[in-house]
Amino acid sequence: MILKQTARTHIKLALMFGILKAREGGDSAKAATLTHFLRFQPKKTWKERAAGRLEVCFGATLA
């Protein structure tokens, strides 16, 4: 689960950096496309959310 979170974070940071660079370069179309991808990143599944809650409360994880 932590690897999935790390991968999601890495993807989000890469998109944010790309948006920043596109805006600095004046490429509004590319910035808009990257912003769209950032906005519509897949959300956690119910199982991942439940596992996170259990981990915080009890130190347990779901398989």
Image: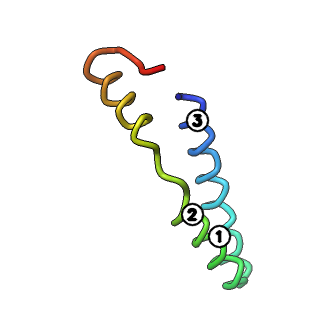
Q: Which residue is mark 1?
A: 34
Relative vertical location of residue 12 with respect to residue 50 in this rendering, above or below: below
What is the C-alpha distance between the residues marked 1 and 2? 6 Å
Badge 1 marks a residue whose secondary structure is helix
Residue 7 percent location from the top left of the image:
63, 40
- Identify the image's colour scheme: rainbow, by chain, secondary structure or one colour: rainbow
Residue ID at (54%, 54%): 42
In the rendered image, which quarter is residue 25 located in? Answer: bottom right
Question: Label 3 is placed on what type of residue?
Answer: Lys
In the image, is 36 to the left or to the right of 43? right
In the rendered image, which quarter is residue 61 located in? Answer: top left
Looking at the image, do the residues carrying marks 1 and 2 touch, with CB atoms under 8 Å apart? yes
- Of mark 3 and mark 2, the one earlier in the sequence is 3
- Of mark 1 and mark 3, the one earlier in the sequence is 3
Q: Which residue is mark 3?
A: 4
Residue 16 percent location from the top left of the image:
60, 61
Furthest-top residue in this view? 59
Residue ID at (38%, 30%): 52
Question: Label 1 is placed on what type of residue?
Answer: Leu
Badge 2 marks a residue whose secondary structure is helix
Closer to us: 17 or 8: 8
Q: Residues within 10 Å of mark 2 (few under 14, many from 20)?
A: some
In the image, is 63 to the left or to the right of 37? left
Mark toward the viewer: 1 or 3: 3
Residue ID at (28%, 16%): 58
What is the C-alpha distance between the residues marked 3 and 2? 16 Å
Residue 17 percent location from the top left of the image:
65, 60
Q: Which residue is mark 2?
A: 38
Residue 50 percent location from the top left of the image:
35, 32
Looking at the image, do the residues carrying marks 3 and 2 touch, with CB atoms under 8 Å apart? no
What numbered label is drawn on residue 14? none
